[in-house]
Amino acid sequence: MALTIRILLVDDHPVVRRGITACLSRYPGLLVAGEASDGHEALRKARELLPDVILMDIDMPQMSGLAVTEVLRKDLPQTKVLMLSTGRHSESVADIIKSGARGFVAKEANPEDLARAIETVHSGDLFFSPDVAGLALNQLVRRNGKSNEPGTRMSDRERQVLTAIADGLSNKEIASRLGIGLRTVETHRERVMRKLNIHSVAGLTKYAIVAGLSALKLAES
């Protein structure tokens, strides 16, 4: 019998909740077991339903999604929280990670990506869309004061290759996605490793996903 992932959907807009519920109904392994329209209701429903995954909007009345997640991290550590909001909130990736959430998916995402994000965090892994991971990486470089050092600057293509590596793509798949040669991908990867002083693909993947934010500890692979 296939495992069903029970989901609590938290968003203060009824139309958004209905739309997401309708999208997820296409996937037999996903079940929206409950809904909440504000932070306090989210806490109550989470304790009552004990969902596997909570889709948590960031902006809500009474308590923000980040505040609710911080409480749930202590009260229901087995429940995985996936932040759900508009793409404009991607600049808050540091706060998302610190709250205890396992990832971020934009409301603009297509149903396939949303389902994959839910399944990913439920399995214990992290999910950040490539654009969010890339933005966090740029923020880290600026925070460390390295943006003015030529040796640490990354080209747009190097950032694209890095986020594709974090997305689990092979060199051949990256070449196909970006429309460049295999050797060019390898060259960009080597340059990124040299600039970041990281010497393995696994290290690059971890760095790209969490962008060096020490608030999150990844399990060793």
Image (cartoon, rainbow, N blue to C red):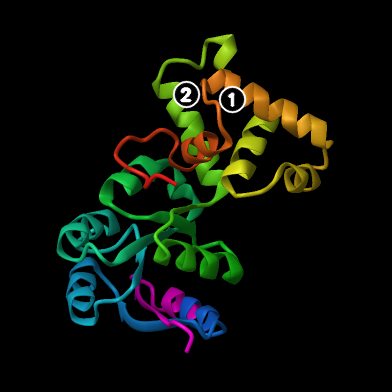
Residue 94, placed above or below residue 10: above
Q: Residue at x 22, y 66 (%)?
A: 39
- For numbered disc 1, what is the local secondary structure? helix
Among numbered discs 2 and 1, the one appearing first in the sequence:
2
Q: Report which quarter residue 84 is drawn in.
A: bottom left
Chain part drawn in magenta: 1-19
Q: How many marks?
A: 2
Residue type at the position of mark 2:
Val
Between the C-alphas of marks 2 and 1, the distance is 14 Å
| Nearer to the camera, 6 or 38 | 6
Whether residue 155 appears in this view of the structure is no
| Nearer to the camera, 214 or 70 | 214
Coordinates of residue 218 in the picture (x, y in percent): 37, 45
Q: Which mark is residue 193?
A: 1
Q: Residue at x 36, y 35 (%)?
A: 213
Coordinates of residue 100 in the picture (x, y in percent): 28, 52
Q: Residue at x 55, y 26 (%)?
A: 199
Q: Residue furthest front?
A: 221
Q: Which residue is mark 2?
A: 141
Name the side, left or right, on which 47 lies relative to 98: left
